[in-house]
Image (cartoon, helix red, strand yellow):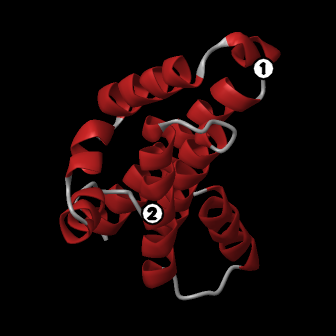
Amino acid sequence: MEQKDYILREIEKIGIILNFIREKFFSSKSNLSKSIDDQLKDMKEMLLTEIGLDIDKFLSLNIEDSNEYICSFKGFNSENIELLAGCISQICLNENTIDSKKHLEMALQLYELCNLKSQTYSLERENKIMTIKNAL
């Protein structure tokens, strides 16, 4: 029982952090003047300090290792993985650089991991996957 409570708190904590990041980047108009690189840098720093998730390390891993890496964090359930993928894809969809393509590929991989972990089909998730594939 105590272990289950701990895991639920971790899931909620990561969800709150990811929602905070989304709010910070997508709700204010001041971020429109920030470059994509600056937004990604800020997001990477926040994820590293708040959760311990190193995006650069994640990008350097192959698919199996990266899935294992993301799943090693307590509290990363399919909903939180989908939130992370949404943050990354929202920042990078309007940019056509090599870095943004790498990040979009990472977001696509995260969405596909959600499909594997989730027991429900999501039309919204599939639409996001198609949008990313079209952008790549």
- Kindly identify which numbered label has been placed on residue 89: none
- Could you tell me which quadrant the C terminus lies in? bottom right
Question: Where is residue 73 shown, x and y percent of the image?
Answer: 27, 54
Crowd around label 2: few <14 · some 14–19 · many ≥20 (10 Å): many
CB atoms of marks 1 and 2 within 8 Å: no
Q: Is residue 57 visible?
A: yes
- Amino acid type of disc 2? Leu
41 or 13, which lies in front? 41
Above or below, 119 against 110 in this view is below
In-image side of 120 versus 28 (left or right): left
14 or 43, which lies in front? 43
Secondary element at tag 1: loop
State the separation of the CA atoms marked 1 and 2.
26 Å
Above or below, 10 against 25 in this view is below
Q: Which residue is mark 2?
A: 110
Question: Where is residue 132 shown, x and y percent of the image?
Answer: 62, 60
Crowd around label 1: few <14 · some 14–19 · many ≥20 (10 Å): few
123 or 101, which lies in front? 101
Look at 53% across and 54% down and name the residue there.
85
Q: Earlier in the sequence, mark 1 or mark 2?
A: 1
Secondary element at tag 2: helix
Q: Which residue is mark 1?
A: 28
Look at 65% across and 27% down and name the residue there.
25
- Amino acid type of disc 1? Ser
Above or below, 120 against 64 in this view is below
Look at 51% across and 80% down and name the residue there.
115
